[in-house]
Amino acid sequence: MSMTAVIKVPTYKKIVHEGWRRAVLKEFLKKYLSRAGFHDADLVITPLREMITVYVERPGLAIGKSGRLSKRLTELLKQKFGFENPYLRAEKVEEPFLSARLIAHFIAARIARGERHRRVVFIAMRRALSAGARGIEIKIAGKFGSQRAREERFRAGVIYRCGEDLMRNVEYAVEHILLPQGMMGVRVRVVKPEAKTPDQVVIKEDKIHEFLEKIQEKSEEEILDEEKKQQEEVDDG
């Protein structure tokens, strides 16, 4: 009588596999929904279905007429990733130029059309800062019409390089463009509007009101004390 041993997969391997699966899913959605302006995706697995939320610039291009594109994408997700009952929904990105991925895609698409990279970069930086970004850095590397490749860097505002500020407040994205002269890369770093710098001064209005009330109470007490003293001096006189 032969018994098959049940192999228990370690927990860390499950975590690594789930992270790899989500990364591959995002890469697939990025390519499939490039025309819709893909920003990010969330995957929530429940006992009944797999809920996939995609954040795009133009949700209409992700859903399609009468939901045709979303149905086709649902079938592809079943085949490629083994989802049993995927549910897809699209959310609009309110500020596209606060997304590093969308900015990099914008620059790459404009350069691929033949526009000058400096003009495109300055347009993207101006729009990002107008949208509320604390800082932005754009690097473009490749052949700019010459035989030798070089890198150009553009920066505005505050940019974090290391530490917790980099992990929490900076969004990073990379795009590649295949041009006749060779491959060109676009790297974008965007500092979020809610980022707090160490030198930022925060004024607490409630504390100011409390302090003013205390000063007012003290001044009223001092006035009453002075009136009492003057009254006592008059009585003594």
Image (cartoon, rainbow, N blue to C red):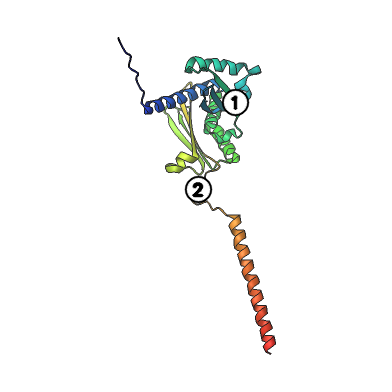
- Between 74 and 45, the one lying in front of the other is 45
Q: Which mark is residue 90?
A: 1
Disc 2 crowd rating (10 Å Cα; few below 14, some 14-19, many 20+) is few
Q: Quadrant for the N terminus, please.
A: top left
User: Which percent across, then down, holds residue 220?
Assistant: 65, 71
Tell me the kind of residue under disc 1. Ala
Q: Residue furthest top?
A: 1
Disc 1 crowd rating (10 Å Cα; few below 14, some 14-19, many 20+) is some
Give me the residue at 44% from left, 33% from top.
Answer: 151
Marks 2 and 1, how far apart in space? 33 Å
Q: Is 232 left, or right, of 1 in this rendering?
A: right
Q: Quadrant for the C terminus, please.
A: bottom right
User: Which percent across, then down, holds residue 225?
Assistant: 64, 77
User: Which percent across, then down, holds residue 182?
Assistant: 45, 23
Give me the residue at 52% from left, 27% from top.
Answer: 44
Point out the tag, 2 or 1, that comes first from the N-terminus: 1
